[in-house]
Image (spheres, grey):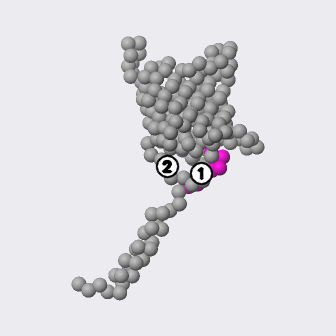
Amino acid sequence: MALGYASPMRFLLLLLVNPILVAQPSPQLDHRWAPLAFLIGEWTGEGGGGPGQGSGGFSFLPDQDGKILIRKNRADYQASKDRPAFSHTDLMIVYNEPGETKLRAIYFDMEDHVIHYTVEPSTDGNSVQFVSETFRLTYRKTGPDTLALKFEIAPPGKPGAYTTYIEATAHRNQKPETKN
């Protein structure tokens, strides 16, 4: 079977067009998320604390054309002698209030908690704290694809007097493609 003129042209066209289709640019990460860039992705974690030894995962992903970050979290706890096994899910939205320089976050969970946080990234870009009078959630980069996290609670009437409730570690499931 002889190759006609059209076959080599189709082959050449396919070679030229295929990389263009495959190499579509990934969405750019909005500059406001630069201090939180180390969090972007999907994570698997393990830890312990007040509710006991748990496992689960969370994600921090841009949404609404990159105007907000959404964290979805799930923690699963095994049964103990005092309680049956249970799961905890929550949602946090990180946003920039128009006219403000500090990032903010609002948190919701299945237990009807609503927490308003101020977001305080470190100057070196390796950690961030989500802070309210009663709660403080800290993520600290421990490697290219690993984190340590700590959730602290202040006792009633003692705002800012945090004690550790949960400590955990997490590893990134896969690194997202982003351009800065």
Q: Is residue 153 visible?
A: yes
Numbered label attached to residue 29: 1
Q: Residue furthest top?
A: 82
Counting from the top left corner in percent of width and height, residue 6 is at 36, 84
At 44% from the left and 46% from the top, the residue drawn is 174
At 48% from the left and 47% from the top, the residue drawn is 175
| Relative to 179, 172 lies left or right | left
Q: Quadrant of residue 155?
A: top right
Q: Amino acid at mark 2?
A: Pro
For the N terminus, give its image quadrant: bottom left
The residue tagged with tag 2: helix, strand or loop? loop
Counting from the top left corner in percent of width and height, residue 104 is at 67, 36
Which residue position holds label 2? Answer: 176
Q: Residue furthest right?
A: 99
| Relative to 64, 76 lies left or right | left
Q: Residue furthest left?
A: 1
At 62% from the left and 32% from the top, the residue drawn is 129
Region in magenta: 27-33
C-alpha gap between disc 1 and disc 2: 11 Å
Counting from the top left corner in percent of width and height, residue 20 is at 48, 68
Nearest the eye: 88 or 134: 134
Q: Amino acid at mark 1?
A: Leu
User: Within 10 angstroms of label 2, few (less than 14), some, or many (20 or more) residues?
Assistant: few
Counting from the top left corner in percent of width and height, residue 143 is at 50, 39
Q: Earlier in the sequence, mark 1 or mark 2?
A: 1
The residue tagged with tag 1: helix, strand or loop? loop
Q: Quadrant of residue 37?
A: top right
